[in-house]
Image (cartoon, rainbow, N blue to C red):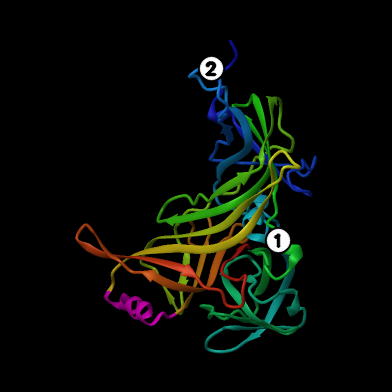
Amino acid sequence: MGDLLTKRGSQLSIALENSYAVDPGSGYKQIEIIDCNPKRDRERLEREVIRNTFDKPAAKPGNESATFDISVELHGSGTNGTAPETDTLWLCAAGRKRVIAASLSITGTNSPTFTELSVASGGTAFAVNDLVLVVAGDGSAAEVGRVTIVTSTKITLSASLTATPVGKLVKGGVQYQLKLATDSTLQALPSFFSQFLRGGKILEKINGGKVNNLAMEFTSGQIVKPVFSVEAKYFSSIVAGTLTGAPTDTLIPPHIARYMKLNLGAAGCYGASAVTFALANELYRQLSICTAGTQNLIRTGRAVTGSLSLLYDEDYVTFETAWDNETLAELMMVSSAGNAALVQGNIFAACIPQIKYLDIPKTEDSGIYKLDIAWEAQYVNGEDTLLMAFL
């Protein structure tokens, strides 16, 4: 009798595909996972032939597919400008990635709002909708902002910093942004090839994986665990074997929902106990009789939604007014390892430039009223409903 397969013995290695559903053969990276359990799906084709018996003839296998969730801990690489180990998943969820190596000294600012960063030159290394890190040379006093205007000598942010940035640095890091529908070369979401070593014994290879949903939940005091839901072509093989790619042994602390920076419009929502958001990619399974079944998974739509939970302070009646008037607001979320200060190299920022409130139900918790606000993202210029970065 062979060894039993255990969850704790399992490992996952993934690599971007150069051609859909084709093993790239290199570029694999093993990633730390909380949960992953790929599932095979196969159509059963019932046969309707009539024979001299009441029994049905054996069904035949039809098209195959695969689905699974990949749950991980949220953390950066430890170095600003270097992508996290889960880089492939973030890229496949959003569609585009930019690495900004620039680190510019800030020579001036406007007052008293601190929304303009003056630099000697090189400002065009950044672009509109980049999320940037403003930080002292020793890594302290870190803040995050969204770029709205760029020239070679000035970078304008969407909201004011809390302290003067003069003498600090502005850095870009790794940006994950949504893929453009207006550029035919960028319409398709990237795909990845997976090697899942189940129980440390059985190697399952799954090709043509695309992320159809990214869900994130920041709950006070809890480790942040992004979940990437994946649709794939099928299992290309299941054999005894070993993984491709170097093993991961990261010591970067995971993000904990403590001391987060959460801003909605011009105000900070310090009383929020939880915030969530989800990026949903609608995928159409393109079938072909000239292939094994699935020829590709085509993205046909996208939605960014979320929620915000907070105690009903009397000042929060402004949410009612915004809902009545369909007022839009920017939502910025910044997290790190749960310490009082943000640590560059391990900062995650997500910004929704415009959210619209869908519903503001009042609930009750231990005799105190709460607001559980549901929202959806609205685009400004298209493809900018969600911006994410590791800084």
Above or below residue 299? Residue 50 is above
Above or below residue 23? Residue 157 is below
Q: Amino acid at mark 1?
A: Gly
Q: Are marks 1 and 2 in contact (CB under 8 Å)?
A: no
**Crowding near the residue tagged with mark 1, few <14, some 14–19, many ≥20 C-alpha atoms within 10 Å:** many
Residue 141's spot in the image, x, y percent?
56, 69
Residue located at (58% from left, 83% from top):
115
For marks 1 and 2, give the CA distance.
71 Å
Would you identify the image quadrant in which residue 283 lies?
bottom right
Q: Is residue 107 left or right of residue 159?
A: right
Q: Which contiguous range is marked in magenta?
A: 314-327
The mark lying in front, picked from 1 and 2, is 2
Residue located at (58% from left, 62% from top):
301
Would you identify the image quadrant in which residue 361 lies?
bottom left
Residue located at (46% from left, 72% from top):
263
Q: Secondary structure at mark 1?
A: loop
Q: Residue furthest top?
A: 1
The residue identified by callout 1 is 81
* Numbered tag placed on residue 14 in the rendering: none
Q: Is residue 143 one of those drawn in magenta?
A: no
**Among the two numbered marks 1 and 2 on one chain, the one whose residue lies closer to the N terminus:** 2
Q: Is residue 368 left or right of residue 377?
A: left
Q: Amino acid at mark 2?
A: Asn
Q: Residue furthest bottom?
A: 111
The quadrant of the rendering that contains the C terminus is bottom right
Residue 126's spot in the image, x, y percent?
71, 74
Q: Is residue 238 visible?
A: yes
Q: Is residue 238 left or right of residue 199?
A: right
The residue identified by callout 2 is 52
Q: Is residue 319 one of those drawn in magenta?
A: yes
